[in-house]
Image (cartoon, rainbow, N blue to C red):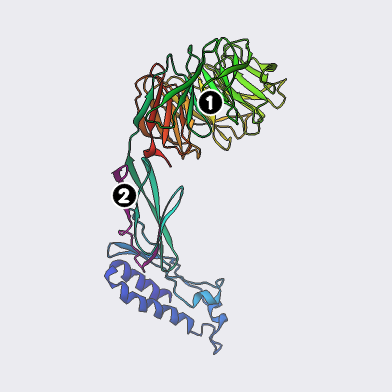
Amino acid sequence: LTELGYQVSKDLLLNPEDAVGAVPKLDEAAQALLNRDMNNDSTIDHADLHAWVPSFDKDALRFDYDTRIHPIVLKIYNADDIYEDAQNLIYPSIPPVADAGDDIYIDFGESVTLDGSKSYDSDGYIVKYLWQKWDGTYCSGTTPTCSIEKLAAGHHLFDLIVTDDQGAVNSDSVWVHVDGNAYAIGTFNTPDNARKVTLSADGTIAYVADSSSGLQIINITDPSSPSLIGSYHTSGSALDVVLSADGTLAYVADYTSGLQILDISDPTSPSLVGTYDTSGMALTVALSEDESVAYVADHWGGLQIIDISTPSSPLIIGNYAISGYARDVSISVDGNIAYVADEDNGLQIIDISNPSSPSLIGNDDTLGTALSVVLSADGTIAYVADGTNILQLFDISDPSSPLLIESYNMFYNAYNVTLTANDTIAYVANGRSGFQILDINDPSSLLKIGRYNTSGSAWDIVLSTDGTIAYVADGSSGLQILDISAFAR
């Protein structure tokens, strides 16, 4: 067998076109071993294999035939190999070759057909084509093509997985680039400088923190024709506003006048319920889940923790004097941790499980000037708008040791970040440069998928429930309303 196998191997390497003829020769070689009485005991059995020791040990031969690589494996067995393996020459399955085609470029609204027809299997045939991306399977079956009617604007990576008749698999990927745009559908020019915006639960009213003109209340039932329905002139400068869950109270970060609490049960006639004059300058406010505590980013006053269980008589219950200037605050899902954007000192992470005695857990000095912070839905990632051109992402699964995931250069100042409900898209307010739209499916590799340059200075963005409309607090240009349906996922 050794000599015959060697000769066949040599001929095969020198004359690859004789591959078909080589198979019977190799089979003959195997049968020669299996049918030979090696120990001369007049029987052919296991002992004959163990009595034979080869003088040549060549494990595998490969040859180039018809432009494809076909392996033929000739196994030479020694006394330690088992009898069953020696009875066959082994011809292993060659994996199929997946070919998802070239990258595709389309406009939003166009359909696309993914084409895997250039995939092939050299020693059989493909029995299954599976097209998928991060959000699920799009096509699966014996057809190599996959037609998709509509994709959101952005960059979509599709994986093609092919399976051959022997169960071997292979994969390839293709990018589909969808070009889309946001466009203006409505605007409302507020009296002063629109800094923050939030929506009623039913999405019909926008509440705008409008600096020196206080709180502006705008009917957005028809986004193309917003109209003023009420306002309240606060004593300071309204820079942020959040609503109670039932929509009857508005909590306003009112700069030099601290926290203002307004009754908005009748949006046409808001009224002051209570106030707490913080020690610094109230810039933003966040509420505990049960709405009994307000957390105020109070600039040089640090983090102010205020009991609002009785809205008419808010009381200070704790504060944390951070090292810089508190610009923004977000609260963890369990309500035990506050994440504070601390300007030049970056991200500060504070234990607030005991509101009367907050303490530092961890921090990270960001590259720029931390102006705002927002958390992913699962609370494991903090997105920090880091002022001069940068959006930074931190893994906060261990709050005591935040880890930088990504530092994305915006080329424009980053003031605020708004995430879609499913954490797939980030809208970043860039001041006088409008806002940018980023694909954040892979937090370690952000992709820019769109941009819109508003007429004013974009400070804040809030989205409609279905993610098709953006409401932008646009500084001197008031409230800008844009159709972003091309990016909705």
Q: Nearer the viewer, residue 370 or 57?
A: 370
Is 111 part of what is drawn in magenta? yes
Position of 131 relative to 255 (above/below): below
- Could you say which quadrant of the image residue 279 lies in? top right
Quarter of the figure that contains the N terminus: bottom left
Disc 1 target residue: 373
Decide: few, some or many residues near mark 1? Use Cα within 10 Å; few <14, some 14-19, many ≥20.
many
Q: Nearer the viewer, residue 430 or 239?
A: 239
CA–CA distance in space, label 2 to label 1: 37 Å
Decide: few, some or many residues near mark 2? Use Cα within 10 Å; few <14, some 14-19, many ≥20.
few
Element carrying mark 1: strand
Q: Residue 285: x percent and y percent?
A: 58, 21
| Total tally of numbered discs in the picture | 2
Residue for point 47% across, 84% down: 35
Residue for point 55% across, 10% down: 235
Q: Which residues are magenta?
A: 102-130
Q: Nearer the viewer, residue 202 or 341?
A: 202
At label 1, the amino acid type is Val
Q: Residue 82: x percent and y percent?
A: 56, 74
Q: Nearer the viewer, mark 2 or mark 1?
A: 2
Is 136 part of what is drawn in magenta? no
Say if residue 321 shows up in the picture.
yes
Quarter of the figure that contains the C terminus: top left
Position of 297 relative to 441 (above/below): above
Element carrying mark 2: loop
- Lower sequence index among marks 2 and 1: 2
Q: Residue 60: x percent and y percent?
A: 42, 65
Label ID, residue 284: none
Q: Residue furthest bottom?
A: 42
Disc 2 target residue: 111
At label 2, the amino acid type is Ser
